Image (cartoon, helix red, strand yellow):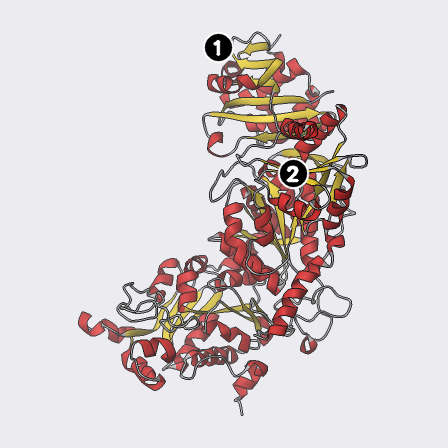
């Protein structure tokens, strides 16, 4: 497996930092290397916020994402801001509320991530976990079992079932 | 064996606790706050104490006080707070009080860019406090190494009775990475030497035959003695005697300078056949490693020397390196601070160049590749 | 032939002290030692922390665990010592400049925390060590080397200041009444919390000479003639209050102490395991 760079973007409060941590942790459970980092300070509150994950079988030297392979965007603002950093041939996963971009050199998945969280799970805050499910279906970067294990260790106590359900919805989103 | 995903700042606290930290005092400052927050959470669980002081100066003074009372103590800060702590760092140097100061660097001067990385406190770590002195400063480049080097910072502080500065990048402090800290039974823990003589024979600042530093009693153990920031005699009491002054300052400096072989650690990467060497530390060394791998694939004979102990500098190793390579490029997120030290050591034997960046952005591997190629073609 | 008290509690090898003749610092230091003696504290259990300035040199003369720290920071060092080892009786000796100018922030916050430290401020209304500059307690209009035309600043009332900040024992005395100083230090040490004792002392060399206050004896006489207790002071008119030094115990109201609270926290965490 070669180095894969993820950028999870949206607005502050959408749980994307937790999402990044979970993805990185799942990779580690699978015996891979992972580095997770995020934007800090005023940038992290509202506006476009981002969490970055690098996963590689080999040791990770350079710890930052320059041109990502996979970009998740849950808001129009974050998509507009970070789309230019998605490499040619990369994968864009966007919420259905976001306009389809004009780039022809990337693969785009436009899916109802937030809608599923709101209507099926009654909790908009689990959109991040739904997103992790769909990311893994598309990229197959970690095992579903490890991802679920990582979700369960990182979410608040008492919300395990809800988050498990959110992940399952994410897994089914392309069906 | 349990492998965990851990943040750099968290690894710093884990390392400190492993080393036996029982006291933390500090003041909140980005990007170091997690170190205070996790210390506040963990210390009472192990019978340790945490206190948030009213200012940075107080944080430094308080850890010195706690160390005098016998507890291994740490504070963490960033550039602006590091500036404020300097007077009391000097106090810990002259009074020989073990303690650890973590500086998670940010862009300066002044408030600068509070959440952006820089490596701009290299010279402040060396010369930040006034007067002649030596200092130990360590610079890890990964989450795992933060853990190990924090333990080492405490060990060196205890062994040499001196403040030890741990320089972190915001990049490494804030990122999460794989670490295995359960497999740490082999880690050596050093505690300060206590006096074995009866209290009436105790000379608080006398170095016994075969020892590096005076043995240190804690306040309250029955060894009543005096500590001062003034130049002092072996008794600990102040004096204006010029011979004593010179002897004391020389002893404080030489206890570090005479033991560089014990204190200095470094890492070398693909230097055996290299004719170009990059000198880099912290996050920059990770960019450099990537650049070197790419350049090697193109046939460039390039390697890296990475000081882990920044101060005292690995002088012997850098001198040796200067005899074996045609070029040394010092790459750092400042405008050439460590370059001055490398050039001083290596400049007489080889070409020493610098590449710096001061805008809050990490130095990317492509930039290092370009600088190597540029000089090569010239 | 030194007195028994000097024999028992002072480091003979460091005497004579550096204070000028006529300086009141010796009176205060002796009163502190008498208080420690009268309370029967073990010397090994007493820690004296001082800052920088004339009065702060006292720590070097006293046979306890002593530490002479940096300017203004005695209370921060003391906070670390006390929190690390709550069994120690921690006493801070500080001057007016050390405690209320450069160290003012620590004074406020040590009071707020109610940490069990007894602070004695030797207030001589001047920076003596540096040669007579005005301090936060130099009266308005008085002269100093840096106030050659008279001090324009207002003064701190240190007792009012720490009361507002949360100190639990507060008192003031002058070197004319060493027994009062001793009693207040005793009560301050007995208080499980932050205690401040402000002692008005005299500096004939700088403050006295600059302001034509006369010699040491005249300055002592001045303290005698201008000291007044709170009850008597409250009966005076505003004009009569002018220039008076109110002495006595102003506040003695215990509340939970910081290091005790922290020890309870540690105990409660151990129980949870």
Identify the subunit bearing mark 2: B
Q: Nearer the viewer, residue B240 or B170?
A: B240
Relative to residue C241, is residue B108 drawn left or right?
right
Looking at the rendered image, the quarter that the N terminus of chain C falls into is bottom right
Q: Which residue is mark 2?
A: B353
Q: Is residue C109 visible?
A: yes
Please identify the quarter of the rendering in which residue B294 is found. top right
Q: Residues within 10 Å of mark 2 (few under 14, many from 20)?
A: many
Q: Is residue A15 visible?
A: no
Q: Does residue B88 lie above or below A86 as drawn?
A: below
Q: Are marks 2 and 1 in contact (CB under 8 Å)?
A: no
Relative to residue C115, is residue B174 drawn left or right?
right
Q: Residue furthest front?
A: B378
Task: Please tell me whether mark 1 sits on a helix, a strand or a loop.
Answer: loop
Identify the subunit bearing mark 1: A
Q: Are marks 2 and 1 on the same chain?
A: no
Q: Which residue is mark 1?
A: A99
Checking the image for residue C123, the label placed there is none
Q: Does residue A125 lie above or below C48 as drawn?
A: above
Residue at the spot 50% in from the left edge and 42% down from the top edge:
B108
Question: What is the distance, in whole Å, between disc 2 and disc 1 at their CAs?
Answer: 49 Å
Residue at the spot 57% in from the left edge and 35% down from the top edge:
B357
Q: Residue furthest right?
A: B272
Please state the horizontal and vertical placement of residue C110, each as a whole percent of the image.
45, 60
Please state the horizontal and vertical placement of residue C150, each as a whole percent of the image.
27, 68
Q: Residues within 10 Å of mark 1 (few under 14, many from 20)?
A: few
Please state the horizontal and vertical placement of residue B69, each as a whole percent of the image.
61, 63
């Amino acid at each position: 497996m070669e180095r894969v760079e993820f950028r999870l973007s949206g607005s502050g409060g959408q749980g994307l930092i937790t999402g990044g941590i979970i993805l990185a942790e799942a990779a580690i459970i699978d015996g891979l290397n992972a580095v997770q980092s995020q934007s800090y300070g005023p940038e992290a509150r509202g506006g476009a916020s981002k969490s970055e994950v690098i996963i590689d079988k080999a040791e990770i030297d350079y710890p930052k994402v320059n041109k990502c392979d996979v970009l998740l965007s849950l808001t129009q603002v974050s998509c507009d801001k970070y789309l230019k950093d998605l490499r040619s041939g990369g994968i864009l996963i966007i919420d259905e509320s976001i306009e389809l971009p004009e780039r022809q050199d990337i693969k785009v998945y436009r899916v109802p991530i937030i809608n599923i969280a709101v209507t099926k799970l009654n909790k908009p805050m689990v959109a991040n976990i739904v997103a992790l499910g769909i990311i893994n279906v598309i990229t197959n970067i970690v095992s579903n079992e490890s991802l679920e294990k990582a979700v369960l260790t990182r979410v608040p106590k008492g919300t395990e079932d809800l988050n498990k359900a959110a992940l399952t919805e994410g897994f089914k989103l392309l069906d | 064996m349990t492998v965990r995903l851990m943040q750099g700042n968290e690894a710093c606290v884990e390392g400190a606790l492993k080393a036996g930290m029982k006291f933390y005092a500090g003041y909140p400052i980005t990007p170091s706050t997690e170190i205070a927050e996790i210390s506040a959470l963990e210390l009472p669980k192990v019978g340790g104490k945490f206190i948030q002081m009213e200012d940075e100066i107080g944080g430094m003074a308080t850890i010195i006080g706690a160390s005098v009372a016998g507890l291994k103590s740490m504070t963490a800060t960033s550039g602006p707070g590091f500036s404020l702590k300097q007077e009391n760092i000097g106090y810990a140097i002259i009074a020989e009080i073990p303690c650890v100061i973590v500086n998670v660097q940010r862009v300066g001067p002044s408030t600068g860019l509070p959440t952006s990385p820089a490596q701009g406190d290299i010279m402040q770590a060396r010369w930040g406090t006034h007067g002649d002195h030596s200092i130990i400063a360590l610079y890890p480049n990964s989450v795992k190494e933060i853990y190990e080097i924090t333990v080492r910072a405490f060990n060196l502080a205890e062994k040499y009775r001196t403040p030890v500065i741990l320089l972190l990048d915001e990049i490494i402090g804030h990122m999460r990475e794989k670490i295995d800290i359960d497999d740490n039974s082999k880690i050596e823990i050093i505690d300060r030497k206590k006096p074995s003589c009866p209290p009436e024979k105790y000379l608080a600042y006398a170095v016994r035959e075969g020892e590096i530093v005076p043995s240190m009693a804690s306040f309250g153990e029955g060894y009543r003695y005096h500590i001062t920031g003034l130049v002092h005699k072996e008794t600990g009491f102040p004096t204006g005697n010029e011979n004593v002054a010179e002897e004391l300052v020389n002893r404080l400096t030489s206890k570090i300078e005479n033991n560089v072989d014990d204190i200095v650690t470094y890492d070398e990467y693909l230097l055996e056949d290299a004719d170009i060497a990059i000198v880099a530390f912290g996050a920059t060394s990770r960019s450099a490693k990537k650049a070197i791998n790419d350049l090697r694939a193109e046939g460039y004979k390039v390697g890296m020397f990475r000081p882990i102990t920044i101060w005292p500098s690995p002088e012997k190793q850098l001198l040796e390196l200067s005899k074996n390579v045609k070029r040394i490029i010092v790459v750092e997120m400042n405008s050439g601070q460590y370059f001055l030290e490398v050039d001083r050591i290596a400049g007489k034997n080889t070409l020493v160049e610098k590449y710096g960046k001061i805008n809050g952005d990490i130095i990317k591997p492509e930039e290092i590749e370009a600088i190597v190629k540029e000089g090569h073609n010239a | 032939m030194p007195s028994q008290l000097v024999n028992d509690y002072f480091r003979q090898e460091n005497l004579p002290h550096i204070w000028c003749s006529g300086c009141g610092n010796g009176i205060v230091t002796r009163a502190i030692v008498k208080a420690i003696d009268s309370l029967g504290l073990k010397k090994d259990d007493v820690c004296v922390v001082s800052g920088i300035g004339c009065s702060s040199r006292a720590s070097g003369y006293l046979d306890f665990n002593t530490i002479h720290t940096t300017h203004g920071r005695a209370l921060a060092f003391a906070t670390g010592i006390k929190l690390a080892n709550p069994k120690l009786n921690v006493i801070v000796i500080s001057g007016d400049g050390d405690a209320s100018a450069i160290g003012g922030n620590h004074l406020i916050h040590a009071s707020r925390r109610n940490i069990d430290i007894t602070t004695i401020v030797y207030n001589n209304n001047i920076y003596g060590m540096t040669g007579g500059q005005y301090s936060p307690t130099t009266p308005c209009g008085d002269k100093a080397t840096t106030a050659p035309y008279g001090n324009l600043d207002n003064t701190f009332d240190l007792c009012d200041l720490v009361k507002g900040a949360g100190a639990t024992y507060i008192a003031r005395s002058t070197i004319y009444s060493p027994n009062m100083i001793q009693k207040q230090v005793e009560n301050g040490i007995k208080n499980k919390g932050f205690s401040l004792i402000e002692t008005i002392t005299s500096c004939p060399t700088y403050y006295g000479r600059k302001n034509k206050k006369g010699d040491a004896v005249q300055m002592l006489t001045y303290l005698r003639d201008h000291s007044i207790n709170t009850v008597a002071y409250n009966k005076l008119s505003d004009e009569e209050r002018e220039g008076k030094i109110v002495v006595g115990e102003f506040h003695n109201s215990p509340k939970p102490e910081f290091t005790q609270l922290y020890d309870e926290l540690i105990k409660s965490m151990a129980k949870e395991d």
